[in-house]
Amino acid sequence: MIPLETAPARPGPGQPRPWAFPHVEMRGLGDGLTLLAAPVHTLPLVSVLVVTAAGADTDAPGAEGLAALAARAMVEGTGQHDGASFALAAEQLGTAIDAGADWDGAYASFTALAPKAEAAMALLAEAVVAPAFPSREVERLKGERLADIAQTEKEPRGLAEEHFAAAAYRGGSRFARPLGGTRASVGTFDAAACRAQHAARWRRAGSTVIVVGNMTVDGAAAMVERALAGWRGAPAPRVPVDDARTTAGRRVLVVDRPGATQSELRVGHVAVPRTHPDYFPLVLGNAILGGLFNSRLNMNLRERNGFTYGAGSGFDWRRQAGPFVASAAVETAVTEPALREMLAELEAIRAAPVAPSELDLARQYLDGVFPLRYETTGAIADALAARVTFGLPEDWFATYRERVRAVTGEQVQAAMQAHLDPTAWQVVVVGDAATVVPVLERMAIGPVSVVPEQLP
């Protein structure tokens, strides 16, 4: 064994290899439908993704979760197939048809071998254009969601996330309620509600079909035109969600779990939308603060103090302002010192420019890992869906790495100062109130309130 004092120095990172995001061609297919096609011939696969403005941000008050339920139910039966035969038809093509919704949009997708893409596209079109919403399947999916809610109420991490969202946004905001809905809202849904939601939101105009893989642009256009020839209409207008942060100021919410041996910690507030000009400095800043294993939060709370198995932070990027949150799970006995260290790191990232070594490491990681994220046709399709959803420039992915490399330490500090506000922290602690409330009051972070172990 080579003695440590004579061992060779660890080699430094090499120069990033050249890499280019696949060429993408955009075409209008008539009646407001757009095609994005990216020929990728390295594998005999084709991924298709239909994205439309039918996300959870379109849920009406009292109907939170309907967009998500209706999207999931689209693949449970169509005018030509019941649920079982639809799944079997997809299986026989070597694929699966998936559908769902997030905050900013809804999608339906598949990945199949290129020779099967035409048949898979026809099956996908059935779900998009003419889903049947069988009552039995809708009730099953509704039951699954209600079971998820019951499970979340017994899971500290889920409780912390939902209570943080409710605390961070102004009362009444759609973003203050779970994406999948509440027990009260989901309980009112039925097949008729799903049909109405689909009829209003899953419309041709304004939708985009993304085709990535072993297919020409002309072939992709012809395939989509044939499959979606009967799709018509424009969706109802999209009403912006209230994305303002709470006006309550800095405060602490304790979700009481009597006898709990751990505390789930969340600290943050509503931040900025995905298209904010400070996006790249914030991405680098968060990587340094809590986005990587060797980030400040994890090195402090896990490695240096042994408070937790992992601590981190992140921005939830949305079309409108999404939240920033730092998180960790710690033993009840160290709730106070762990929270002090977390708050100190949140202040430190604002107080001084980051060290060049930290910035270089974060830049090298984000630069180097970026191409790895787009090694499959499905991942490329997802990236293009994000481009559509957020209205990103056409060269966004082509120029991503050079923009990451261009961020300076001063830009990181300025962005973190501008968008992390210690006077607005919403602190959520899921744990034993009898133990943690006295120490939280002693810390004088803000007014402390206690709620029972249930979802907001």
Image: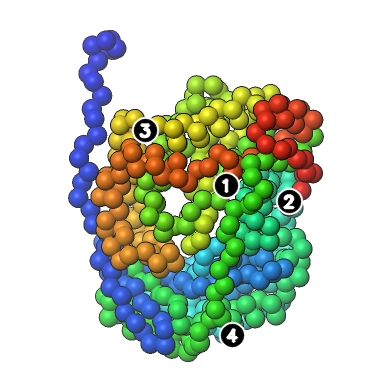
Q: Choose the circle earlier in sequence order: 1 or 3.
A: 1
Q: Nearer the viewer, mark 3 or mark 4?
A: 3
Circles 3 and 2: CB atoms closer than 8 Å: no
Q: Nearer the viewer, mark 4 or mark 2?
A: 2
Left or right of 121? Residue 175 is right
Who is closer to the viewer here, 8 or 16? 16
* Position of 41 relative to 423 (above/below): below
* Position of 126 relative to 63 (above/below): below
Query: Residue at left 50%, top 21%?
Result: 304
Name the disc covering residue 79, or none: 4
Q: Percent position (x, y) of residue 355? A: 34, 30
Task: Give the residue type that dot 1 points to.
Answer: His
Q: Disc 3 designates what residue?
A: 354
Q: Percent position (x, y) of residue 106? A: 52, 69
Circles 1 and 2: CB atoms closer than 8 Å: no
Image quadrant assignment for residue 71:
bottom right
Mark 4: secondary structure: loop
Image quadrant assignment for residue 367:
top left
